[in-house]
Image (spheres, rainbow, N blue to C red):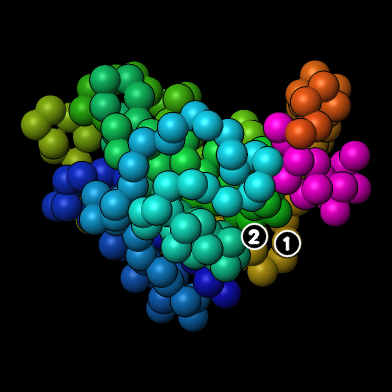
């Protein structure tokens, strides 16, 4: 079992980094192969909005994203962490998210993977937003194994060690979900089916040349 742990924070010694360390250690101790990715260390350019990837399945930008996408495809599941920044995710995570949306999201390339999301905020806000983006929901439609959200205070008063039990339990749950192939709930399946109907009717069928690669992927999945 291979799990990719993604740190979406530029801060290297904060609550998120420490929490991901605890989770990664637990996963490795339980026998998982852990791959670590710090977005702050990766060369990720802004998406240009050219949509070439929707047609061809390849991005025109030459940076680290091709390798990152390969690692995401190879993984059985993800642990994704980022703090709240002004009610949203960090800027580096947003840049990463935009780049994977068209190559992994629209083609539904990782919809069968499982995700554990971890976020924190100083005082309040950002909980629902980060659940959606860090959990790789919406267009990605991964299985959300768990979402941990912590209010750590300003300055930070809660430390990763204070919540080690919750972090380790979530890591165990992620591995169990991957091993058992835990499925999505009824509401999630219905929502995904409705999304596919809307996208198929109003995007794919109206602009087949623009979405040629997406259509090919959907046909392989039996969605067209």
Across and down, in percent, residue 221 comes to 84, 51
Vertical order, 36 against 162 (above or below): below
Q: Are marks 1 and 2 in contact (CB under 8 Å)?
A: yes
Q: Secondary structure at mark 2?
A: helix
Residue at (64% x, 60% y) in the render: 177
Residue at (41% x, 78% y) in the render: 29
Whether residue 57 is visible? yes
Q: CA distance from mark 1 to mark 2?
A: 6 Å
Quadrant of the rendered image containing residue 121: top left
Residue 221 colored magenta?
A: yes
Judge from the rendering whether residue 83 lies leftward or rightward of residue 184; answer left or right: left
Classify mark 2: residues with Cα within 10 Å, few (<14), some (14-19) or many (20+). some
Whether residue 194 is visible? no
Quadrant of the rendered image containing residue 92: top left
Q: In which quadrant is the C terminus drawn?
A: top right
Across and down, in percent, residue 136 comes to 54, 41
- Which of 24 and 152 lies nearest the eye of the viewer? 24
Across and down, in percent, residue 8 comes to 32, 45
- Which of 26 and 101 lies nearest the eye of the viewer? 101
Residue located beneath label 2 in the image: 177
Vertical order, 40 against 74 (above or below): above
Classify mark 1: residues with Cα within 10 Å, few (<14), some (14-19) or many (20+). few
Quadrant of the rendered image containing residue 152: top left
First to last magenta residue range: 210-224
Residue 139 colored magenta?
A: no
Q: Secondary structure at mark 1?
A: loop
Residue located beneath label 1 in the image: 181
């Amino acid at each position: 079992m291979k799990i990719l742990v993604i740190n979406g924070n530029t801060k290297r010694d904060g609550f998120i980094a420490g929490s991901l360390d605890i989770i990664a250690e637990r996963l490795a101790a339980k026998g998982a192969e852990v791959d670590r990715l710090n977005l702050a260390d990766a060369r990720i350019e802004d998406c240009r909005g050219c949509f070439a990837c929707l047609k061809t399945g390849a991005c025109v930008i030459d940076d680290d994203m091709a390798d990152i996408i390969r690692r995401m495809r190879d993984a059985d599941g993800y642990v994704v962490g980022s703090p709240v920044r002004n009610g949203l995710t960090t800027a580096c995570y947003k840049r990463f998210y935009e780049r994977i949306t068209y190559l992994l999201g629209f083609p539904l390339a990782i919809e069968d993977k499982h995700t554990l999301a971890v976020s924190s905020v100083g005082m309040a806000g950002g909980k629902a937003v980060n659940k959606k983006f860090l959990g790789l929901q919406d267009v990605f439609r991964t299985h959300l194994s768990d979402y941990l959200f912590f209010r750590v205070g300003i300055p930070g008063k809660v430390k990763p060690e204070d919540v080690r039990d919750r972090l380790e339990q979530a890591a165990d749950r992620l591995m169990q979900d991957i091993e058992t192939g835990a499925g999505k709930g009824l509401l999630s399946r219905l929502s995904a089916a409705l999304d596919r109907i809307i996208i198929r009717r109003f995007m794919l069928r109206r602009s087949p040349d623009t979405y040629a690669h997406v259509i090919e992927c959907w046909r392989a999945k039996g969605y067209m």
